């Protein structure tokens, strides 16, 4: 299981370098490269918070919008058969394809969160 940090809506990875004996990470799910490191968990968490704050300050100083992680949309390429089946189901239900896919994903993730029966 992977550990992730969260702060101000940003998600950061946690990695360990055996060579350097240092913890390090980067902001995940954004295009910009933002990294941080620390010698222990407390230091890594502080460096992560500082990296997020510095990134937001830099974007403001440059007059640009910071990347927002996990904005709520992504492309899915299920192949022609699943695409057709999902679209036909959506049409029969009077729903959008987005609603059918979101409901299916929600049910799948909810069942995974409950673990094996």
Image (spheres, rainbow, N blue to C red):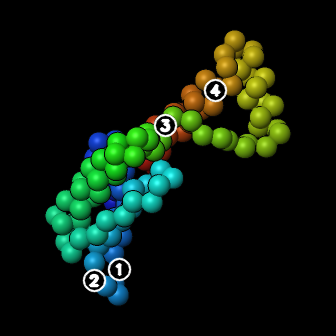
Nearer to us of marks 4 and 1 is 1
Q: Residue furthest top?
A: 94
In the image, what residue occupies the spot 57% across and 28% down? 103
The quarter of the image holding the N terminus is: bottom left
- View extreme (left): residue: 42
Q: CA distance from mark 1 to mark 3?
A: 31 Å
Mark 4 to mark 2: distance in Å?
Answer: 45 Å
Q: Which residue sits furthest bottom?
A: 19
* C-alpha separation, residue under disc 2 versus residue under disc 3: 34 Å
Q: Earlier in the sequence, mark 4 or mark 3?
A: 3
State if disc 1 and disc 2 touch (CB < 8 Å): yes
**Are there few (<14), some (14-19), or many (20+) residues within 10 Å of tag 4?**
few
Determine which residue is flagged by label 2.
21
Is there a contact, CB below 8 Å, between mark 2 and mark 3?
A: no
Q: Helix, strand or loop at disc 4?
A: helix
Counting from the top left corner in percent of width and height, residue 81 is at 82, 38
Marks 4/1: CA distance?
41 Å
Mark carried by residue 71: 3
Which residue occupies 56% across, 35% down?
73
The residue identified by callout 1 is 17
Q: Is residue 113 visible?
A: no
Q: Where residue 91 sits in the image (x, y, percent)?
A: 75, 17
What's the distance in space between the residues labelled 4 and 3, CA to CA? 15 Å
The residue labelled by disc 4 is 98
N-terminal of the two: label 1 or label 3?
1
Nearer the viewer's eye, disc 4 or disc 2?
A: 2
Q: Against 7, is 33 above or below?
A: below
At label 2, counting other C-alpha atoms closer than 10 Å, the crowd grade (few under 14, some 14-19, many 20 or more) is few
Upstream in the sequence, badge 2 or badge 3? 2
- Compared to residue 96, the image places residue 34 above or below, namely below
Query: Looking at the image, is mark 4 or mark 2 earlier in the sequence?
Result: 2
């Amino acid at each position: 299981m992977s550990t992730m940090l969260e702060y101000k809506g940003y998600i950061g990875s946690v990695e360990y370098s055996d060579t350097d004996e240092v913890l390090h990470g980067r902001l995940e799910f954004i295009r910009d490269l933002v990294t941080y490191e620390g010698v222990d968990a407390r230091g890594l968490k502080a460096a992560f918070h500082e990296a997020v704050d510095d990134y937001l300050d830099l974007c403001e100083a440059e007059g640009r919008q910071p990347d927002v992680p996990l904005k709520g949309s992504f492309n899915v390429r299920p192949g022609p058969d699943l695409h057709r089946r999902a679209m036909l189901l959506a049409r029969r239900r009077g729903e959008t394809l987005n609603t059918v896919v979101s409901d299916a994903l929600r049910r799948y993730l909810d069942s995974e969160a409950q673990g094996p029966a």
